[in-house]
Image (spheres, rainbow, N blue to C red):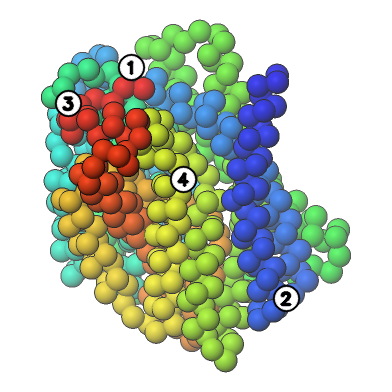
Amino acid sequence: MRIFNEKLKEKLKEALKAVLPIIAIVLALCFTIAPLTPSILLCFLLGAVLVMAGMMFFTLGAEMSMTPMGEKVGAAMTKRRSVWLIIVISFILGVIITVSEPDLQVLASQVPSVPNRTLILAVAAGVGISLVAALLRILFGVPLTFLLVICYVAAFLLLRFVPKSFQAVAFDSGGVTTGPMTVPFIMALGVGVSSIRNDNGAANDSFGLVALCSVGPILAVMLLGIIYQPGESDFQLAGIPEIRDSVELFRLFGRGLPAYLHEIAVSLFPIVLFFGLFQITLLHLSGRSLIRILVGLAYTYVGLVLFLTGANVGFLPAGNYLGGVLASLKFPMILVPVGALIGYYIVKAEPAVYVLKRQVEEITEGAVSARAMGVSLSAGVSLSIALAMIRVLTGISIIWFLVPGYLLALALSFAAPRIFTAIAFDSGGVASGPMTAAFLLPLAQGACLAAGGDLVTDAFGVVAMVAMTPLITIQILGVAYRLKQRSGSGSLSAPEYAFAALDEDTIIEL
């Protein structure tokens, strides 16, 4: 019990460090250049409390349940030594966890001219195929860079045939499908698959699964755009709540809570059912291990419900209103530095980012620290939001940002160490999570509406931008690491020596 309390306190401190800077920035803007109504401010503050509580329970639950579940399933699949079994199970698993992702439901409701179910199933199939390719890559040692180049070149070629109103949505889909439900399980699945191999000829890293599972939906949604040829979107911004007293504030969040209780239960059920079948047929875990996983699932459930309620009911209208106020100022370009500042800190509040940083630090034995990862991610997201705000105010096509950005990221993949490339492309999907959808995207939408732009072509694409820039900043970190390694032995720590000594095709064992 004492260990549990210490863990809970640790998670609370992490949540406070992640969310308090965002609160401070919004309050500073509220009392200076961008005044918020009392209703919006109250919703934001209560939402922030729920987001912090949700992060605390989710990160603890993910450690206890989602991560060990993914590792056990990955190891069990590989032990069977059946390629066809891996293909079938990984495809089904990819479809299940994608359909379970709450952010995908939000995106589907905003996409013009394509039925929600059609979009969700197409994206799920794209993730399923990508997950199959990612696991086979680990087993057969196919270089990740080779697959990424093929996939993104295919995406760029398809852009010629995709309607302009659908291009930003297609790239956004790659970010929203790798959210808090998907990332912990998929990353742990990679650890499980790679840890069972002990020959030097196999691919070394357990990273890269999220990277490939992010590009699959982009291709799938582009194909849908070509088939359906959608026109202009009829998407409208959510209404701004007007709260007269504390009772109405309580009722507002009370109306949102049951919806997320149901949504997260529906999302978790297929994963729990799938793991249950694995437990009966292949795993046969002890009762104590099962109880720990079940308790962890309960924390994950509570955490996600609180987090999404706080983010969508409290943060979304605040971001929307704040963007409109800033874009209406005499100097609307203030949006660029403000957006960059918010982006730097808001990525720290993404639930799945914590999972990625912890796994990177553990697997590299501290050679790539969680702090270095955090700074690189924050710098990348800060840059992406600055560019997104410029695009919102000027109407520049997203293609002029995405194509050069991804070409630079792919070029860096030939200079950075392979594991940094895998981590970087994973980070892009991880960074663009529910906080991006619930605060940064509404911020861009509110600014776009105030500036007289087109919501679909100018505001959408924020998620895509957030998913792109960490690919560049983390690979630059990798290039710097390689230069540091070559410059001399005096500046490398013991864990870095061990990490640097590994052959690029060596298995990294947990």
Q: Residue at x 45, y 64 (%)?
A: 382
Secondary structure under tag 3 reads loop
Ranked by sequence position, the earlier of labels 2 and 4 is: 2
**Mark 2 and mark 1: Cα distance apart in space:** 56 Å
Q: Which mark is residue 31?
A: 2
Q: Quarter of the image containing the N terminus?
A: top right
Q: Is residue 135 visible in the rendered structure shown here? A: no
Q: Report how many numbered discs are placed on residues in the image.
A: 4
Q: Residue at x 17, y 57 (%)?
A: 411
Ranked by sequence position, the earlier of labels 3 and 1 is: 1
- Which residue is situated farthest in the front direction here? 490
Q: Residue at x 67, y 28 (%)?
A: 6
Tell me the residue that label 4 is attached to.
371
**Mark 3 and mark 4: Cα distance apart in space:** 29 Å
Q: Quadrant of residue 223?
A: bottom left
**Residue type highlighted by circle 2:** Phe
Q: Residue at x 52, y 26 (%)?
A: 65
Can you tell which of label 1 and label 4 is closer to the viewer? 4
**Residue type highlighted by circle 3:** Ala
Secondary structure under tag 2 reads loop
Ranked by sequence position, the earlier of labels 2 and 1 is: 2
Q: Is residue 371 visible in the rendered structure shown here? A: yes
Q: Residues within 10 Å of mark 3 (few under 14, many from 20)?
A: some
**Mark 3 and mark 1: Cα distance apart in space:** 18 Å
Q: Which mark is residue 76?
A: 1
